[in-house]
């Protein structure tokens, strides 16, 4: 497509008072090589938008460069169908954070407009990845309460669902419960689990195909092109699937590892699961002799929040233990019940249930169980260190029953024979974090996994009770449907939702180094037998990490490439050494760092006028050649501003910041060859709330560069 570019400048919001708009118009006409340059005092208003639309219709403008507010705002206002749009941030990053009408402020506006013009010149119209073979069905793995709810929620939208459960019957762990904790006012009585009703609805629903006694044997492809092999006894079933909800639940922690809490000492030291089984049968008794229970103790956090066992809280145990205490009181009003806890966690309305158990005679003892002993007559006793009072160990004796509230271990596929059996270059199961739960950006994208189109829900995602699991199931089902909808349009899912581009490979330059296949956070690139990369396009999240990884620079997007960013930074005017005006280049992650810098502008916090900011999709997309080019151009320093990495990472693309940090550790050699100090290049972790700290970091970096003097490459 031959481009016809129009440049539209806004003089409102203080922009016209901060910079000389006429000079920007002249620059646009000269360097943008366009005769269509217009200024409006309210470009995002109806008249301003109509001005652009008339030029598109009447003048044949198909490439629109807008110099106004941040590209993060008014995105729908400045969307003009198939016309390409490039935004120049003259408001937040110039007018609102700089001294008006100074030489430095004008130069800043000029550089940002130049970069936008270059970017538009390098941008091509997207050609989305589409296929006639796309499927729109959802596969749900796991037939417990979470899986059944996900299946029903998806089916009710008109989506076809395939439900696979490895057991002979639906129900999962919830089917083994007598009752669940209360979810309705006044939140005082345990309720029916709802499992039987869910099973009935699933089995009767015309859009849900159920396979019990079955497992997924193989999964290949990507969203809307998943080819799934289901093994059901001797039968093999093939399904083309759009998206997957993994609701495989969790397994109670192995009580055999809790010998210090008395498990194995006596048959009367049992788990909550064994206790529920008795309650379902109608009577709670001592397993050793079948006698009625008069005195029982519940040990909360049995193995949970313990570095030797499960370091995390399993969330549901406190409420479940209280519920089981109610079972016993309903059976025997004279029973004595002790609940030993380190911390009680009863979020929301569950606090009302906590009060009810207290009022009904439940004795809550804060402390840690330091020992369990068997007394004469096969009675049991607990030794408790009472942390609340700090007293010497107390003994709760003459007990008929000790119940261990064990935590939950996710069935994520790592240690139980696998779940998904993915044909991915990066492994057959979902990547997990250090606790064994599938890895995700927990705050922003809780259902996402590092495998696009595969969503987790329920206790495989995090510990939770039935009510939370049902809500989780609905969320995951909707995310699965969203993935299908976006994929069938050729668009990316979160965080670059709607992006129609995908990486393209100039294979004639590939050296089979495998960096793209190894570093992709989402396993979107497989390899053939010769180690050539093979993109599975519907898996791609468009982060550009592969582009940043490639030393040959053969990977690019229609609207984002090594060549494009390189040309943008080369378009910046770098004053000579004698002018004493340093230039600092900042690659700012568009997910956190760039918004933080926008917020600095919104709050009128000054930014260093010598800084030039280029937004990037992720720090993982930063190719080291950009840094080399910047230093060769004469920039005095380069900063990468992105998300925090590590165990508590905030990177929207999981590993981008971490990968950038590793790559950056190798830049010192390049700088040394250029006779430049390694400290001229730095990476900083910035969250979206660091809008006050980010300008301070930039100012401190600029000050530190003064010690090195100007870049000796200036002028070459």
Image (cartoon, rainbow, N blue to C red):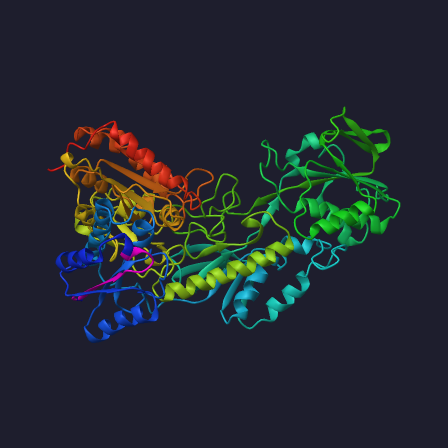
Left or right, 164 with respect to 671, comes to: right
Q: Nearer the viewer, residue 162 or 24?
A: 24
Please provide percent x and percent y for residue 192. 72, 59
> Hey, which quadrant is residue 548 in on the image?
top left
Please provide percent x and percent y for residue 36. 17, 66
- 669 versus 412 height, above or below: above
Q: In which quarter of the image is the N terminus?
A: bottom left
Left or right, 594 with respect to 712, comes to: right
Please provide percent x and percent y for residue 557. 26, 55
Residue range highlighted in magenta: 2-16
- 404 versus 7 height, above or below: above
Q: Which of 456 and 683 is in front in this view?
A: 683
**Residue extending farthest right:** 334
The question of residue 92 being in magenta is answered with: no
Please provide percent x and percent y for residue 377. 86, 32
Left or right, 335 with respect to 301, comes to: right
Residue at horizontal 51%, vertical 61%? 477
**Residue extending farthest left:** 716
- 684 versus 427 height, above or below: above
Q: Which of 25 and 199 is in front in this view?
A: 25
Residue at horizontal 36%, vertical 46%? 597
> Hey, which quadrant is residue 67 in on the image?
bottom left
The question of residue 3 being in magenta is answered with: yes
Residue at horizontal 15%, vertical 34%? 577
Q: Quadrant of the C terminus?
A: top left
- Whether residue 247 is visible: yes
């Amino acid at each position: 497509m031959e481009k016809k570019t129009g440049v539209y400048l806004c003089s409102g919001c203080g922009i016209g008072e901060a910079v000389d708009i006429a000079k920007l118009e002249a620059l646009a006409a000269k360097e943008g090589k366009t005769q269509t340059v217009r200024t409006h005092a309210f470009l995002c208003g109806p008249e301003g938008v109509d001005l652009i639309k008339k030029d598109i219709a009447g003048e044949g403008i198909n490439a629109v460069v807008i110099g106004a507010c941040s590209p993060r705002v008014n995105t729908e206002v400045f969307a003009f169908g198939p016309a390409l749009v490039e935004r120049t941030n003259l408001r937040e990053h110039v007018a609102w954070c700089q001294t008006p009408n100074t030489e430095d402020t004008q130069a800043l506006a000029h550089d940002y407009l130049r970069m936008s013009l270059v970017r538009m010149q390098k941008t091509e119209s997207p050609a989305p990845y589409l296929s006639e073979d796309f499927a729109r069905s959802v596969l749900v793995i796991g037939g417990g309460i979470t899986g059944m709810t996900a299946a029903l929620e998806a089916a009710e939208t008109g989506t076809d669902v395939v439900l696979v459960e490895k057991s002979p019957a639906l129900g999962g762990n919830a089917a083994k419960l007598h009752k669940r904790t209360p979810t309705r006012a006044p939140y005082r009585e345990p309720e029916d689990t709802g499992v039987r009703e869910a099973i009935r609805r699933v089995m009767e629903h015309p859009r849900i195909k159920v396979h019990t006694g079955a497992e997924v044997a193989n999964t290949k492809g990507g969203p809307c092109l998943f080819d799934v092999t289901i093994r059901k006894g001797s039968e093999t079933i093939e399904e083309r699937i759009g998206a997957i909800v993994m609701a495989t639940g969790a397994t109670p922690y192995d009580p055999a590892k809790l010998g210090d809490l008395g498990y194995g000492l006596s048959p009367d030291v049992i788990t909550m699961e064994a206790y529920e089984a008795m309650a379902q049968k109608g009577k709670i008794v001592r397993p050793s002799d079948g006698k009625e229970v008069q005195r029982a103790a519940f040990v909360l956090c049995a193995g949970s929040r313990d570095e030797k066992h499960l370091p995390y809280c399993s969330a549901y145990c406190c409420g479940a233990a209280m519920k089981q205490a109610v079972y016993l009181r309903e059976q025997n009003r004279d029973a004595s019940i002790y609940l030993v806890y380190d911390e009680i966690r009863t979020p929301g309305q569950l606090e009302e249930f906590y009060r009810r158990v207290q009022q009904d005679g439940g004795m809550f003892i804060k402390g840690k169980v330091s020992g369990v002993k068997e007394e004469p007559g096969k009675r049991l006793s607990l030794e408790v260190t009472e942390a609340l009072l700090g007293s010497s160990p107390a003994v709760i004796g003459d007990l008929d029953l000790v119940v261990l509230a064990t935590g939950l271990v996710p069935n994520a596929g790592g240690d139980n024979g696998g779940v998904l059996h993915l044909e991915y270059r990066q492994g057959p199961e979902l990547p997990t974090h250090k606790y064994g739960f599938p890895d995700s950006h927990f705050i922003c994208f809780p259902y996402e996994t590092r495998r696009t189109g595969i969503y987790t829900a329920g206790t495989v995602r995090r510990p939770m009770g039935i009510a939370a699991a049902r809500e989780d199931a609905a969320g995951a089902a909707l995310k699965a449907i969203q993935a299908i909808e976006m994929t069938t349009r050729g668009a990316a899912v979160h965080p670059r939702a709607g992006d129609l581009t995908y990486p393209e490979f100039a294979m004639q330059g590939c050296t089979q180094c495998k960096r793209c296949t190894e570093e992709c956070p989402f396993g979107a690139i497989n390899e053939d037998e010769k180690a050539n990369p093979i993109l599975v396009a519907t898996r791609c999240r468009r982060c550009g990490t592969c582009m940043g990884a490639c030393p040959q620079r053969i990977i690019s997007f229609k609207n984002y490439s090594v060549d494009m960013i390189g040309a943008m930074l080369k378009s910046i005017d770098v004053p000579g050494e004698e002018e004493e005006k340093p230039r600092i280049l900042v690659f700012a992650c568009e997910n956190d760092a760039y918004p933080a810098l926008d917020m600095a502008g919104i709050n009128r916090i000054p930014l260093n006028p010598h800084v030039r900011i280029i937004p990037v999709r992720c720090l993982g997309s930063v190719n080291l050649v950009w840094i080399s080019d910047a230093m060769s151009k004469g920039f005095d320093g380069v900063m990468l501003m992105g998300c925090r990495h590590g165990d508590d990472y905030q990177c929207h693309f999981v590993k981008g910041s971490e990968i950038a940090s590793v790559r950056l550790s190798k830049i010192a050699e390049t700088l040394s060859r250029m006779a430049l100090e390694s400290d001229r290049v730095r990476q900083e972790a910035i969250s979206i709330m660091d809008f006050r700290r980010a300008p301070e970091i930039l100012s401190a970096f600029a000050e530190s560069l003064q010690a090195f003097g100007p870049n000796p490459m200036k002028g070459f």
